[in-house]
Amino acid sequence: MKFGIGQSVPRSEDPRLITGGGQYTDDINRPNQRYIRILRSPYAHGLITELDVTEAMTRPGVEAVYTAKDLQHLGGLPCRAALKNAKGEKAFIPHRPILAEDRVLFVGQAIAAVIAQTPEQAADAIEAIELSVDDLPACADLARALDPDTQPMHPGHSDNLCVHFEQGAADAVDRALAAGDHVVRVSMVNNRVVPSPLEPRATLVEPQGNGFSIYNPSQGALGQRAVLANIFAMSSDQIRVISPDTGGGFGVRGEVHSEVCVAAHAAMTLGLPIKYTGDRSEMFLSDNHGRDNLTDVSASFDANGQITGVRVETTANLGAYCSNAGPFVPTMAGGRILGSVYRIPHVHHSVKCVFTNTMPVGAYRGAGRPEACYVMERLFDAAARQLGMDAIELRKRNFIAPEDMPYQLPSGVTISSGEFANTLDMALERSDWQGYAQRAETSQAKGMLRGRGIGFYMESSGGGPEEEAAISVGEDGRIDVIVGTFSHGQGHRTTYAQILSETLGVDFEQINIIQGDTDVVAFGGGTGGSRSSQMGGVAVKRAGLALVDEAKPIAAELIQSPVEQVVYADGMFRSAESDVSVSLQQVAEASKQPQFGGRKLSKTLRYDRGGGFTFPNGAHIAEVEIDPDTGVISVDRYTAVDDCGRVINPLLAAGQVHGGVAMGIGQALYEHALYDDEGQLISGSLMDYAMPRASHMSDMDVSFNEVLDPNNELGVKGIGEGGACAAPSAVVLAAIDALAHFGVTALDMPMTPERLWRAMQQSSA
């Protein structure tokens, strides 16, 4: 089948996008629309003593100014992470106001909003608002959040602890650590990063009846509608959410932010369309950040190098409030795969989620799993060094073996497939592991230091357990597919069309994928957690098969054959007893006739996978060069072998690997959302926050070890987040290897030239 499963089909979306035909939220305008600008707190912590908007209201073009008192009926921004501690006590989830009420808790917090006829007028009026704040001591340092002398941020709560999450057998790990022949301890940092989608956040809200319609980039329009319906205490049918072309997701698109709520309130109050577009520096202050953990890991190994127990103790920064998924990310999302691909008898996982006077932290590509994988890879690298063993042999000795499947992880979830040793061997071969010594000599001859590192990962993907696809066939043979996932760069229009093209045996070009409009899409879980192929893809395949069953009675009547003798293949219904046939298009035409129901041929199917997840995994190998005089580091070679189950489209899957690796390299080498002691964001723009450029990326050798998942008929697992899970470990361990002869055994991200240079100087001293 042309353009079926397994073929590298270029994205059908791309010609429109690269020729300027894309339509993003900021491209959409309405007559008489008004504009929002936001007054943001310049203070990290303090009590609001004056907020006077009188002068702002008199400025030209200003039509409204809103403060917290105008939005009190809306409540606050939600958090869905209903966690409990080991005693069964609920996590403390503080009220998060849409606009700051009596205090501010981080720089950039929205305090007031101006609605004006032009963006310039709104910005001018913002400058006229009188704001006074009595400073309170700020804590932006994660390590000090729980110190006795650090002031609690939330009134009525005695400290800055949200929840102390624990899972596993603490006593068993205590015994394993006490009895181990070798005990390995590593401390590490997962640095705070800023999601920076190509498209900044933008919103256009129009009043509509007794509700509103909203254009908004998202990772799922239905999810955003559900949040907005809750905030506004409205029924879902009063709100329409349309997500047009969306320039990147990375987790932040799964949130509803303050500006959206203000715009919706203003649209309904003023009866006018309201538009908000943030600029890049504003997004640094107001988009949820990612990562930001401190972790100590302790593990025991026996004399043969078998791991016997692991304790992971993490302090996770939530920022000033709980984002929608905030405390879920470092606890259950990361904890689900803690231990990764290694067979570990006993695990104790402890996470203290704490508040600081910083931007709230939310889901960021991988959402907890990259952090968990980084912990295990740093641990095994340190263990190999301490035990005097080859790091590859130590990993293989502790891998979960194929014959162990299905295998229950320490978290209680079960993995069903994976050939970890084979995947690692493929990576070693493709990276020319044996030829490394010659490359190291070449680097040395240039005065450079060379190192190599392995980043093995396993992550869990799947997200919400239900998804829906609705397929209809027009009289012209065109096939429309409505899905509840949402593509913000992944290429769903291409991959879903490939799946259905192969399922129905119809031309790829006949298929049209529809998404992102709650007036059209009735049900769906959106896109996040690499769930689309295994949820939306399976739903599309099953809906296609169900459509054939729906059409068979009509086909049987047309070809005058008993239904049980009708077979379908390559777009044609045939009688098993004769040569008579009829096409799917002809059946669609006939279905509009009164005797066949007088309706369009269509079928809607909701797929429920039940419990469980899929577990993509892979082995990535990085080689780096470091200039010993300056500390400048470059990634010279990068090899990735991923097991994402069946690969629907190798070209698009490789693109997902490239993107994930780029983000992982960015975290490892460049990116750091850094606050000073007063809670001011120092790296608040692209002048200060270093993102990787194309020149920082080496060529990547990307390949796949297709170990099919037995729990879905496509055999898929997910690919969107593997690179972000593997690259930080591979690059950091390569740098440690390069500096090994200086006595360097540990480095923290981001490994800036200054940090590497200082590590060499301190070790030399």
Image: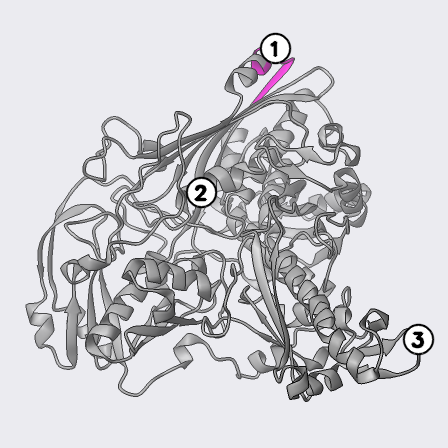
The residue lying toward the viewer, choosing from 71 and 285, is 71
Q: Which mark is residue 179?
A: 1
Mark 2–mark 3 Cα distance, whole angstroms, equals 58 Å
Q: Secondary structure at mark 2?
A: helix
User: On residue 577, which mark appears?
Assistant: 3
Looking at the rendered image, the disc whose residue lies closer to the viewer, 2 or 1, is: 2
Tell whether 437 sits left or right of 44: right
User: Does residue 153 lie above or below 665 as drawn?
Assistant: above
Q: Amino acid at mark 2?
A: Phe
In the drawing, does residue 430 fall left or right of residue 659? Answer: right
Q: Is residue 303 magenta?
A: no
* 78 or 565, nearer to the observer: 565
Q: Identify the disc placed on residue 389.
A: none
Asked whether disc 2 touches disc 1, contact meaning CB atoms under 8 Å apart, the reply is no
Quadrant of residue 318 within the rendered picture: top left
Cβ atoms under marks 3 and 1 closer than 8 Å: no
Characterize the local packing of mark 3: few (<14), some (14-19) or many (20 or more) Cα atoms within 10 angstroms: few
CA gap, disc 2 and disc 1: 33 Å
> What residue does disc 2 label?
328
Q: Is residue 751 left or right of residue 450?
A: left
Residue 601 location (% of width, % of height)? 65, 79
Q: Which residues are magenta?
A: 176-184
Q: Earlier in the sequence, mark 2 or mark 3?
A: 2
